[in-house]
Amino acid sequence: MTYRELWQQLTQLYDEGEAKAIARMVYEVRYGLSLSDIYIGKDTQLSADNQAELEEIAKRLAEGEPVQYVLGQVDFAGHTFLVTPQVLIPRPETAELVEWVSLTANRQRPITQMLDIGTGSGCIAISLAARFPQASVTAWDISAEALAVARENAKRTRVHVSFEQVDILHLTSFHQTAGAFDLIVSNPPYICNKEREDMERNVLHYEPHRALFVPDDNPLLFYRAIADYAQTALTSGGWLYFEMNPLYAGELKELLGRMSYHDIELSTDQFGKQRFMRAQR
């Protein structure tokens, strides 16, 4: 199978541009071939074993499995992260959240203690640990499987993050530590069940639903729990950062205001959607 044959097969599921991008990713990550290599025909010179592997990859992609799971990795915020079906695939928007935190978090004072709630692959916590080497970074997730992936990613990236299995909706007294963090960041589940019909099939069929969805009648479920915890856990003047569903930006801002957070600020993503919010305790 050649590069052209692969991307043409994928146009049954994706538009031409995305199909070509996926095919390029396969050849570059799995076989070390650049687009220039493909142009001079090196994609036709794979060994029999590699061709057999490529046929299996093509089959999985044709069934809608995300290329990041097929290849087992994704580039995010300057690092390469291991991903498995036990964790969400890190999105470019979330890399924008990391960038926003990096640019704004320590303008007033140094950040020495950070917490990432719902860490998944660890992409936020690990990226921030790399950017704030002086800070102690903790990351929570309810899933033991996700934490195993995150720990491996921290090891590969050569940063230290303290990973803990914690359910933010059911905290124990052990985690009720006053003033423990200068900054809390989270990209929690925020898609309502009613939005499923508008989602891409490869997301619905392959990514972990527990990390995606919230009840239709309680879209701010995790934000409320995190903000409530942060009222105690943040130092005075500490910052709370969220990635959020643009549909509920107004409601989240109102919630944080009622909880006496101040300097509430919204930021848009690369598509112009209100995707991020921060507030100060």
Image (cartoon, rainbow, N blue to C red):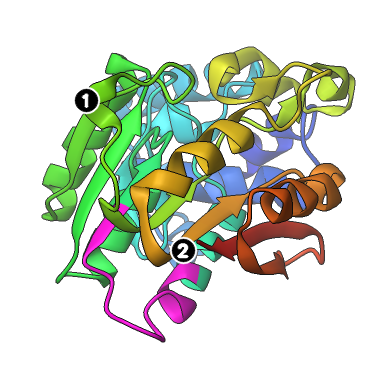
Front-lying residue, 208 or 216: 216
Badge 2: residue crowd in 10 Å (few <14, some 14–19, many ≥20): many
Q: State yes or no: discs 1 and 2 in contact (Cβ < 8 Å).
A: no
Badge 1: residue crowd in 10 Å (few <14, some 14–19, many ≥20): few
The residue identified by callout 1 is: 174
Q: Is residue 82 above or below residue 95?
A: above
**Which residue is at the far bottom?**
107
Q: Which amino acid does label 1 sit on?
A: Phe
Q: Does the magenta stretch include residue 110?
A: yes
Q: Is residue 203 above or below residue 111?
A: above
Q: Distance between the residues labelled 1 and 2?
A: 22 Å
| Rendering coords of residue 244 (x, y %) | 68, 46
**Picture residue at 73% right of the left edge, 29% below the top:** 191
The residue identified by callout 2 is: 239
102 displayed left or right of 276: left
173 displayed left or right of 26: left
**Picture residue at 75% right of the left edge, 16% below the top:** 215
Span shown in magenta = 101-114
Instruction: Classify residue 223 by image quadrant.
Output: top right
Instruction: Classify residue 141 by image quadrant.
Output: top left
Front-lying residue, 34 or 247: 247
Q: What element carries label 1?
A: helix
Q: Which amino acid does label 2 sit on?
A: Trp
Q: In this view, does 94 lie above or below 225?
A: below
